[in-house]
Amino acid sequence: WPGLLRYSYRPREDNQNGVSLQHMSLTLEHDADVSVCQNCVFDPFVYYLDFFDEPSYADNFIEAALGGTQTSMKRGNHDFTTISSLMNHRHYLKALAAAAKMGVRVLTLWMEVMRNLAKGSRYCTEGDASEATHSWDKA
């Protein structure tokens, strides 16, 4: 049995879905299904947009964490330059990586899941079971 089920994955050659984490965080403002979700029970993007007042808040946060710089949002800014004086270089890099990972998980992936759940809910209330199922499968 050993070696019977072999699997290999080459990210540069085998990834053909055309979606990246950055794409997810930058396309929220352009997705009319998110920002104009009149029949949604819960439209999560509106809450985040109201707080940060910046549609690309997730990308802004992650880029700043990875670069050790400041975010440039109207609200909810983070300054990743200030923590460099509080720890040695190795721990500083680990802290930046942890912030970027949290930004990906909480600000990008969670929003993508919630966005697709909200879309599915809207399609369901509109009677479009096929699109609702597709959106929930994506979530």
Image: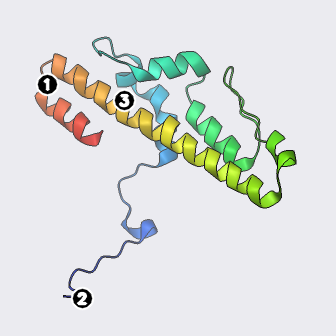
Depth check, mark 2 against mark 1: the one in front is 2
What element does badge 2 sit on?
loop
From the viewer's perspective, is 69 left or right of 59?
right
Depth check, mark 3 against mark 2: the one in front is 2
What element does badge 1 sit on?
loop
The answer for how far apart the CA atoms under marks 1 and 3 are is 17 Å
Residue 128's tag is 1
Question: As shown in the figure, which amino acid type bears the numbered disc 2?
Answer: Pro
Question: As shown in the figure, which amino acid type bears the numbered disc 1?
Answer: Asp
CB atoms at circles 3 and 2 under 8 Å apart?
Answer: no
Mark toward the start of the polypeptide (2 vs 1): 2
Label 2: how many Cα within 10 Å (few below 14, some 14–19, many 20+): few
Residue 115's tag is 3
The answer for how far apart the CA atoms under marks 2 and 1 are is 46 Å
From the viewer's perspective, is 4 left or right of 51?
left
Question: As shown in the figure, which amino acid type bears the numbered disc 3?
Answer: Arg
The part of the image, by quadrant, that contains residue 122 is top left
Mark toward the start of the polypeptide (3 vs 2): 2
Residue assigned mark 2 = 2
Q: Is residue 98 above or below residue 70?
A: below
